[in-house]
Amino acid sequence: MALPLLSPSENGVLARAWGRGLHRLIGTERLSLLREVALVPLDLTPVVPRVEPGEDVVVLVHGFLASGGVFRPLRARLERDGAARVATFSHAPGASIRRIARQLARVVEALPAGVRVTVVGHSLGGVVARWYVQEMGGHRRVARTISLASPFGGADLCHRVRLLKRAELHGESALLRRVRERAASVDVPHTSVVAEEDRVVVGVECATLGTGDVVVLPRRGHNTLLFDDDVAELVVDRLRRRREI
């Protein structure tokens, strides 16, 4: 509620200052996690837009214990700016990378031929994107992949969480090793986005595919990337680059 003795601009300054103070008090990563939890009940069924050949479509693949709903802010930004139409789907906790990749394949196959598809995956979702592209013929439909804090080199946490270990996200995973070794086997450009303060996927090397370009965002955590303006700008930039080819 606006304070009656202040002008609208003064009220805006106070609101921004309050917001910055709240971020410092709680922490950006904790706020992002709370925001993610609030969005998880949304978009549990696939969201596939009606598009025409020649249009750009971004397919978003979420991470562990999330849903397509966590991408609501990014989806709104991309569609509002006219950068691309957006498709999402949700996968069950503990589902294998291969199973989730089959779900991704069904979403892509539901799109008409001739659309330009970019797959953006957060955490586990980035590994799924590359498995689909490299091992399931997804390179025939996908123009680019972008990973956000994805554990291509494994994550220590996965040794302690049974569902994550079963999903082959630990450091000794044969699946992850295959993804890294075959990353350059298909001509699908990739961008690895790394959160500098990630406490889940720790270190630049663990969060990069080993091919393509790498973008390290300072002062960000694992879940912060879901709601980060710079991430949205990066996706838009990569879409524009693709159109210029």
Image (cartoon, grey):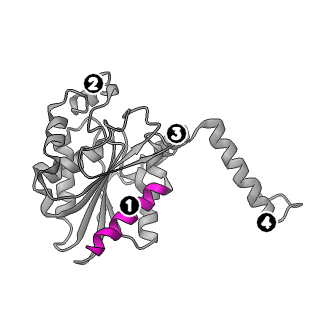
Mark 1 / mark 2, whichever is N-terminal: 2
Asked whether the beta carbons under mark 3 and mark 2 sit within 8 Å of each other, the answer is no
Q: Where does label 4 land, which residue?
A: 8
Q: Nearer the viewer, mark 2 or mark 4?
A: 4
C-alpha separation, residue under disc 2 versus residue under disc 4: 52 Å
Disc 2 residue crowd, few under 14, some 14–19, many 20+, Cα 10 Å: few
Please report the bounds of the magenta region as a residue range.
230-245
Asked whether the beta carbons under mark 3 and mark 4 sit within 8 Å of each other, the answer is no
Q: Where does label 3 land, which residue?
A: 29
Q: Where does label 1 land, which residue?
A: 235
C-alpha separation, residue under disc 3 versus residue under disc 4: 30 Å
Locate the N terminus by quadrant.
bottom right
Q: Position of residue 107 (x, y in %)?
A: 22, 59
The part of the image, by quadrant, that contains residue 175 is top left
Asked whether the beta carbons under mark 2 and mark 4 sit within 8 Å of each other, the answer is no
Mark 3 / mark 4, whichever is N-terminal: 4
Q: Where does label 2 land, which residue?
A: 162
Mark 1 / mark 3, whichever is N-terminal: 3
Q: Nearer the viewer, mark 3 or mark 2?
A: 3
